[in-house]
């Protein structure tokens, strides 16, 4: 209960910035720069389509502005209370990054909104990670899926792109 209250209060602070997917307003990316680190929070409103059973949510960042998952660095929450570091080398299920550079803050559901909240360094120095630019344009990709057996294809309507300068 304490974690949930803290998360809601933090989200309302003035130092958070946000961007919404222009093609899917139920998906919001929030962030807060903290020196050489960034706190990222992906929010997906599951009340829009209550018949969809969200099993995982993913946020990636890609150095290529095309927004594809090829060569993307990702954080994925596969269950409440867990966020893991992944990478993708193509259009296939991503692989877990054994050098986990994700600092868990929260993963769960509050009032029908699926939330994944984590912190990481802008530049981790890990070969499998992409740098998040504190200045300039970043391309973030998001997805969610209802697959209970892993990270299978999320479908065309369960993915999107948010391009934003931090």
Image (cartoon, grey):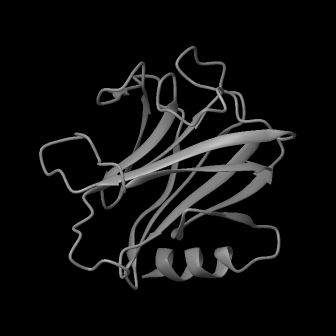
Query: Does residue 57 appear in this view?
Result: no
Q: Quadrant of residue 6?
A: bottom right
Q: Give 149 or 14, whichever is nearer the viewer.
A: 149
Query: Does residue 105 appear in this view?
Result: yes
Residue extending farthest to the left is 149
Q: Give 165 or 122, whichever is nearer the viewer.
A: 165
Residue 46's x, y, as percent?
36, 75
Q: How many marks?
A: 0
Residue extending farthest to the top is 127
Horizontal arrangement in the rendering, residue 64 relative to residue 14 (left or right): left
Residue 121's x, y, as percent?
68, 36
Q: Quadrant of residue 64?
A: top right
Reply above or below: 106 against 134: below
Which residue is found at the position 82% from the left and 41% from the top? 134
Quadrant where the N terminus is found in the figure: bottom left
Residue extending farthest to the right is 135
Which residue is found at the position 40% from the left and 22% from the top? 98
Q: Give 23 or 152, whichever is nearer the viewer.
A: 23
Which residue is found at the position 67% from the left and 32% from the top? 65
Horizontal arrangement in the rendering, residue 146 relative to residue 127 (left or right): left
Reply above or below: 164 against 102: below
Which residue is found at the position 62% from the left and 54% from the top? 40
Reply above or below: 71 against 86: above
Residue 93's x, y, as percent?
29, 30
């Amino acid at each position: 209960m304490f974690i949930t209250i803290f998360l809601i209060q933090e989200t309302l602070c003035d130092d958070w910035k946000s961007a919404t997917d222009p093609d899917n307003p139920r998906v919001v990316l929030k962030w807060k720069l903290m020196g050489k680190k960034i706190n990222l929070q992906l929010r997906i409103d599951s009340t829009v389509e209550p018949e969809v059973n969200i099993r995982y949510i993913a946020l990636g960042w890609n150095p290529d502005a095309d927004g594809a998952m090829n060569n993307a660095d990702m954080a994925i929450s596969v269950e409440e209370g867990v966020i893991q570091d992944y990478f993708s080398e193509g259009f296939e299920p991503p692989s877990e990054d054994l050098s986990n550079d994700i600092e868990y803050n929260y993963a769960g559901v509050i009032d029908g909104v699926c939330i994944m909240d984590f912190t990481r360094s802008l530049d981790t120095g890990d070969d499998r990670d992409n740098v998040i630019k504190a200045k300039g344009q970043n391309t973030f990709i998001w997805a969610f899926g209802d697959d209970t057996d892993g990270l299978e294809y999320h479908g065309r309507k369960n993915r999107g792109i948010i391009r934003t300068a931090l």
